[in-house]
Image (tube, grey):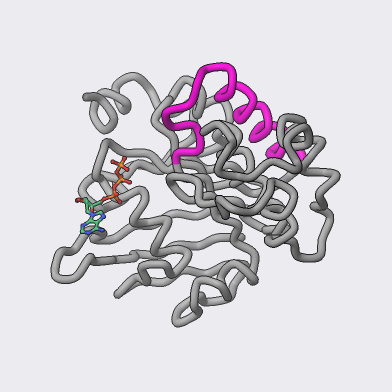
Amino acid sequence: MLLDVSKIEASYGASQALFGVDLAVAEGEAVALMGRNGMGKTTTIRAICNLNPPRAGSVRLAGTDLKGKPSHRVAKLGIGLVPEGRRCFPNLTVHENLEAAARPGSWTLERVNALFPRLAERHAQMARSLSGGEQQMLAIGRALMTNPRLLILDEATEGLAPVIRQDIWAAIRKLKAEGLSILVVDKTLSELLPVADRCVILENGKSVWQGTSAELTADVQDRYLGV
Ligand SMILES: Nc1ncnc2c1ncn2[C@@H]1O[C@H](COP(=O)(O)OP(=O)(O)OP(=O)(O)O)[C@@H](O)[C@H]1O
């Protein structure tokens, strides 16, 4: 397994948010992390990256235990995170934002520009002046520039216009087709399911269901994801 998350628990101060999350991502696989609002998706991602380190359980990346490794080390070991709410440097240009994230590997400025032509057109523009969707593309571009073994996307299409969402999903499909391993959180099932090989559902901070996208029947959706 590329990513192996076993029985992790995590808390915010005295308040426990994760009570045992298991999930795995194999090499080249796209896994969807699902669950209703507040069930622990973002907390799980933050725990995997040691932004909010798990207080129990284990996270392994290609066999390496991430316990005690600061989040910048986790990034170096190969996890590229596109966090909820973007996070680019507002006062750097598009080009500078991408360069600042660069680490050796097959992902280069040219390749990111080819994946997101809108970014190429705006290479000299300050990140703060980009539209929300363009900032999201930049956040994905930055994660790719780190040449990750695993790309984690937390609500990468939230609040974006339909045309831009389609561009972002097209890019994710392309990345998957190229063999990149992906862990993705998104609320729009109709867009998420066709991309996901497997799904993991969280409920109240626990993984309660896992299966292929095909196995995620209407019943399962009603039970765990319905509003
Ligand atoms: N900074 C925080 N401080 C305290 N509690 C938090 C914090 N962030 C999240 N929580 C709590 O942890 C639990 C899991 O939240 P989390 O954001 O991981 O869920 P989520 O599945 O990502 O939800 P959403 O889909 O709404 O983003 C919730 O009960 C939430 O209230």
Q: Quadrant of residue 220?
A: top left
Numbered marks: total: 0
Answer left or right for 45 relative to 65: left
Q: Would residue 176 be found to the left or right of residue 207 on screen?
A: right
Q: Is residue 42 above or below residue 177?
A: below
Image coordinates of residue 217 in percent, x first then y, are: 38, 22
The residue at the point 50 percent across, 71 percent down is 71
Inspect this view and state whether residue 180 appears: yes
Q: Is residue 1 at all visible to an observer of this figure?
A: no
Viewport quadrant of the C terminus: top left
Give residue 16's position: percent from left, percent from top.
Answer: 18, 63
**Residue at the image position 19 percent from the left and 70 percent from the top:** 13
Image: magenta residue range: 155-178
Q: Is residue 32 magenta?
A: no
The residue closer to the viewer here, 24 or 151, is 151
The residue sitting at 61% across, 60% down in the picture is: 2
Is 187 left, or right, of 97 in this rendering? Answer: left
Q: Is residue 214 above or below residue 22?
A: above
**Camera-nearest residue between 148 and 159:** 159
